[in-house]
Image (cartoon, rainbow, N blue to C red):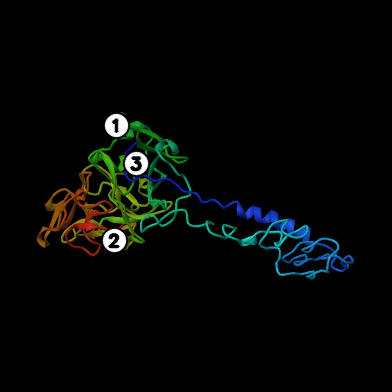
Amino acid sequence: MSEIEHGEATVHSRRPFVASSAFVLLLLALAFGCGDAGSAPPPGGNGGSGGSGGSSGAGGTAGTGGMPGSGGTGGTSGTGGVAGSGGMSGTGGTSGTGGVAGSGGMSGTGGTDGTGGSAAACVTDALCHTCPDRFPCDTEGDCFSGYVCIASGCKTFGGAPIKQCQPSRGGSCLDVSDCPNATDYDCIPVGAGPKACVRVTAGCDPVTEAYDCAPGFSCENGSCVDRRVPCDSYLDCPKSHVCTTTLTASFCVRVYRTCHQDEDCAGFGSRCADVDGDSVKECVGELGSSGNACVNSDCGGSTPVCEMGAVPTAAMCGDYGLCRSDNDCDVGNGFVCVGLGQDGRMECVKSGGSCSNVTQCPLRQVCAAPRNGGSPSCQAGKEAI
């Protein structure tokens, strides 16, 4: 499977032992504190039935002396309680200067809700907004069939990345003949779902990165590189990107991913079609309310290409979209055809800009036209991380 950068491991929190100990001590408190409150102290005793603490005081069942003595110094209730400062026996009678439970009582330091209780399990950020608690992994050998082990974006409190198994999103298949080749790929079930083309050899190829790398990752120098851009909605994403969601994260992903049928495009538009006429299908939105995928042959004039619209699953004829040459773009208004990604697909964008390919941008950024249009630049989404 693909080599994924920034791997991470899951952290679990545990409740301290103090909570169970406190419960046992409470039972002991009930056993020692349930005497007959109406009985009189024995004559001449220095502590009586309730010494300096009584049934819930600072003493035990006997006072500071033995028999006989000068009389009891306390009544049936003293200054301590079930949560006194000592243990079962102290300096005086049967029970010493403390109660049944030691300092801290039922809710002492480290108790049920004390220091070290159920705190958050990891450090979140704009990309990973929920601590992963399902499908943890260290390698892809820990995952289900057809799943890949990738960095979730969350980290432990020590800064270690946390990894999580997520489904591969290669094109669907009936057998391996539907995949790019029979050497690097196999047609296997993805978890309990239908079959898909999954890479079974190491590395990746830019042309087949939609099979080789998880959504949001780019194949660069033979490795899948993290290009996930955080988002709350498609409005946080640049042109030709949609906001997709996994178990723990939401991020922008380029909509034009290789596909074989509409079902392959869940989260990346709504239709699978050959948009630019190069005999390779990719995900795209529906053209208005036509019920059909938007393809460039449906467009023309000053809006010559299919552009993802105001709804993440819809498209319209516009200026920003797939092309094969400058002639497919609105050249008269300064648009050119540029290969911003790594898979060989090209897009109409305004000429100029600060980048012309994703590899020119920092990690977790993409080279794309801003959401409101313009020349391509490195886009960081909702928040740079």
Q: State which quarter of the image contains the C terminus.
A: bottom left
The vertical placement of 219 against 306, above or below, is above
Q: Please state which of the two labelled residues, at mark 2 or mark 1, is closer to the viewer.
A: 1
The vertical placement of 304 against 226, above or below, is below
Q: Which mark is residue 309?
A: 2
Answer left or right for 124 relative to 71.
left
Residue 238, quarter of the rendered image: bottom left
Q: Residue 20 in the image: x percent, y percent?
A: 64, 53
Disc 3: which residue? 170
Answer left or right for 140 relative to 211.
right
Answer with mark 2 or mark 1, whichever residue precedes in sequence: 1
Answer left or right for 236 relative to 330.
right
The answer to whether one can see residue 299 in this image is: no
Q: Secondary structure at mark 3?
A: loop
Q: Which mark is residue 197?
A: none
Residue at 25%, 38% in the rendered image = 222
How many residues crowd mark 1 within 10 Å: few (<14), some (14–19), many (20+)?
few
Q: Amino acid at mark 2?
A: Gly
Answer with mark 2 or mark 3, whichever residue precedes in sequence: 3
**Separation of marks 3 and 1 at Cα, in angstroms:** 13 Å
Q: Amino acid at mark 1?
A: Asn
Q: Amino acid at mark 3?
A: Gly
360 vs 267, nearest the viewer: 360
Residue 3, quarter of the rendered image: top left
Q: Secondary structure at mark 2?
A: loop
